[in-house]
Image (spheres, rainbow, N blue to C red):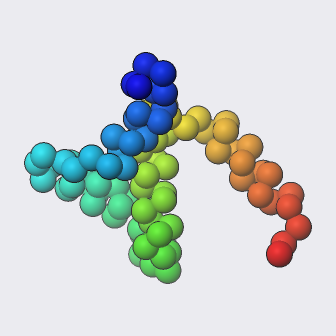
Amino acid sequence: MKEKYPNLHRMALDYLSVPATSTAVERVFSQGRQLLHFTRNRLSGNSVRAFLCLGSWMRHDVVSPEDLIAIIRQKRKRPSE
C-alpha cells in the first residue's frame, strides 16, 4: 500500500503513530510553543492540532504550499453561510 498511496501512507504515520521516546513529543511541544505565541492564545485545541499536523505534512512534502494556498483562496471566494 505504501507504494500505491505514498501520501496517505505518510499521513497515516503522522496521525496514527505513537512516538517511542519523549524526544519527538518535546519537539512537538516546542513547535506548538512557536505556533502559540502569547498573542495567539485564543486558538481552539482543534485549530492547534490542525496547524501542527499540517505543518508536519508540509515538512514531509505530503501537502504542498501551493495546494494549501489554492484551497484557502477557494474558501474565501465562497459566499458566507
Judge whether 45 appears above or below 8 on screen.
below
Which of the 4 image quarters holds residue 28? bottom left
Measuring from the top left, give residue 66's x and y in whole percent. Answer: 67, 36
Give the residue at the far front of this rendering: 1
**70 to the left or right of 4:** right
Would you place residue 49 above or below residue 23 in this image? below
- For the point 11% across and 48% down, which residue is it? 21
Nearer-the-camera pick, 54 or 30: 54
Residue shown at 48% from the left, 57% from the top: 51
Quadrant in the picture for the N terminus = top left
- In percent of width and height, residue 73 lies at 78, 51
Q: Is residue 48 left or right of residue 21?
A: right
Residue located at (55% from left, 38% from top): 63
Residue lying farthest to the top in this orientation:
3
Q: How many marks?
A: 0
Residue 40, how many percent across, how many down? 49, 73
Quarter of the image where the C terminus is located: bottom right
**Residue 20 x/y as whole percent:** 12, 46
Residue 78 versus residue 1 in the image, above or below: below
Please give left or right for residue 46 compared with residue 81 in the image.
left
Q: Residue furthest left?
A: 21
Taking the image as drawn, is residue 47 in sight? yes
Q: Is residue 59 at least partly visible in the picture?
A: no
